Image (cartoon, grey):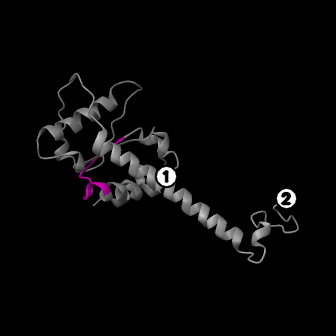
Amino acid sequence: MAGFDYSFSDPFVSKGCLENRLTGKHFLLNLFTMVNNIKRNALLAIVAEWLEEWEMPSLIPRNTSAIDPEEIKHILAIVGPRRSGKTCFMYQLMSSLLQTGRYTKKDILFLDFEDYRLGELKGDTIEDVFTAFQQLAGQPPQFLFFDEIQNLPNCLDSLHDNMP
């Protein structure tokens, strides 16, 4: 295989980079930076889609919610069996906020953690989501709605630790 000198044990050092043995480490650092940029760009794209394109699906109101989202001052987990209406309930809560006229989508962050683009996100890097939101919305979100959050390990612990 032309182009590689196999006399070195470092597989990342190509024939053109023999004079600098740190090239392999630089390659890994550049690869790490590239992956982080891809993750950051994916977060920005997802948040931009929420802010600019996402539309509330038409809903048939089921039970009148006794929960006023403006009064919630802690993490509220909506639990239940599959296909029981948890996501629709979140949509109803978001819709009730938007219908007051006091809030816009710039005040609400909704993420579905079944989105394949969030696959590499970890719970302890949830701050990256907030940074992307603030960069695009110009302010931090006042309300967080996370669907399928069980797909993000340690997220609830990270959120709880970082809440005021």
- Residue 12, disc: none
Residue 102 as seen in the image, left or right of residue 117? left
- Determine the secondary structure under disc 1: loop
| Residue to which mark 2 is pinned | 2
Residue 82 as seen in the image, left or right of residue 6? left
Residue situated in front as seen by the camera: 115 or 158: 115
The type of residue carrying mark 1 is Lys
| Residue to which mark 1 is pinned | 122
- Determine the secondary structure under disc 2: loop
Q: Quadrant of the C terminus?
A: bottom left
- Rendering coords of residue 88 (x, y %): 30, 29
Point out the stretch of residues depicted in magenta.
136-146
Query: Along the polypeptide, which appears first: circle 1 or circle 2?
Result: 2
Q: Residue at x 51, y 58 (%)?
A: 36
Q: Residue at x 85, y 58 (%)?
A: 2
- Among the 4 quarters of the image, the one containing residue 96: top left
Residue situated in front as seen by the camera: 144 or 55: 55
The type of residue carrying mark 2 is Ala
Question: What whole-number distance in Å separates the C-alpha atoms at marks 1 and 2?
Answer: 40 Å
- Rendering coords of residue 38 (x, y %): 50, 54
Residue situated in front as seen by the camera: 60 or 1: 1
Residue 32 as seen in the image, left or right of residue 130? right
- Rendering coords of residue 143 (x, y %): 25, 48
Q: Is residue 71 magenta?
A: no
Q: Is residue 145 visible?
A: no
Residue situated in front as seen by the camera: 17 or 142: 17
Q: Quadrant of the N terminus?
A: bottom right
Q: Residue at x 41, y 55 (%)?
A: 126
Q: Residue at x 49, y 53 (%)?
A: 39
Q: Nearer the viewer, mark 1 or mark 2?
A: 2
